[in-house]
Amino acid sequence: MLPGTSSLSRQTGGRKLARVVFDEQTIARRVTELGRDITAAYPDGELLVLGLLKGSFIFLSDLVRRIDRPLQVDFLVAASYGSDTISSGSVRLLYDPETELRGKHILLVEDIVDTGKTINRLVTLMRERDSKSLEICALLHKHVAERLVLEPRFVGFDAPRSFLVGYGLDHAENFRHLPYIASLS
Ligand code: IMP
Ligand code: MG
């Protein structure tokens, strides 16, 4: 039994965790490195960190505390997946940031890049906004996307092809709160 999961399978339609893929310490170390890389990559200009909800909420909150320069935070809400573990292919924007994007460095923060449809759609939308620059920071990258209009400049980990949950990632809205990243059985 994995830590903190004693009653989880009962509450999650019988889906169980298979194994821990990235533990808390490993994630924390990598997030600190990403924060340093991002700090070094933006010597000047206004930086707006745009977290893609809901999956990036834990990663984003840890990451921005490791970036040592002035920045602003806002969110995007896009919906691409239903309750399934397979991409539906359509991506809808449910919330558009209210913060001004024009003239700023925009850093889009994603939990995981799978088919790339989410990124391709969002990058296309964001490119219409006259920002100073546009980059992506993804915690996880499955490297299965056939074509990405913009390759993430910052990547936490190369991910296995299995379905992952925890540290913000969900399966049918469950498991987001786990402090580690695990695969589903
Ligand atoms: P894409 O559009 O296929 O690249 O999928 C991106 C989105 O799908 C992510 O932001 C996640 O919300 C979700 N997703 C893709 N793979 C996984 C996974 O292994 N676990 C949980 N969510 C995933
Ligand atoms: Mg999701």
Image (cartoon, rainbow, N blue to C red):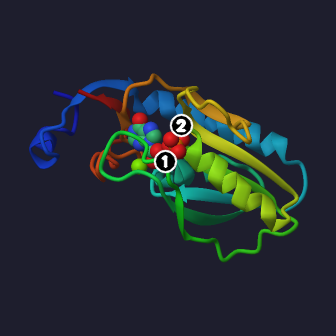
Q: Is residue 54 left or right of residue 120?
A: left
Position of the C terminus, as image quadrant, is top left
Of the two numbered discs 1 and 2 in the rendering, the one whose residue sits closer to the viewer: 1
The residue sitting at 27% across, 49% down in the picture is 174
Q: Name the residue nearer the viewer: 9 or 73.
A: 9
| Outermost residue to the right | 44
> What's under tag 1, amino acid-wise?
Gly
- Give the amino acid at mark 2: Thr
- Residue drawn at (33%, 25%), measured in percent from left and top? 20
The quarter of the image holding the N terminus is: top left
The disc placed on residue 115 is 2
Q: How many marks?
A: 2
Q: Quadrant of residue 29?
A: top right
Horizontally, residue 73 falls left or right of residue 169, namely right
Above or below residue 40? Residue 51 is below
Q: CA distance from mark 1 to mark 2?
A: 8 Å
Residue at image mark 1: 89
Figure check: 71 above or below 60: below
Query: In terms of depth relative to the viewer, which is nearer, 176 or 171?
Result: 171
Confirm or deny contact between disc 1 and disc 2 (CB under 8 A). Answer: yes
Q: Secondary structure at mark 2?
A: loop
Check disc 1 and report its element: helix, strand or loop.
Answer: loop
The crowding category of the residue bearing disc 1, from other C-alpha atoms within 10 Å (few below 14, some 14 to 19, many at least 20), is few
Q: Is mark 2 within 8 Å of ligand 1?
A: yes
Relative horizontal placement of residue 112, taking residue 8 as reference (left or right)? right
Q: Position of residue 145 (x, y in %)?
A: 59, 31
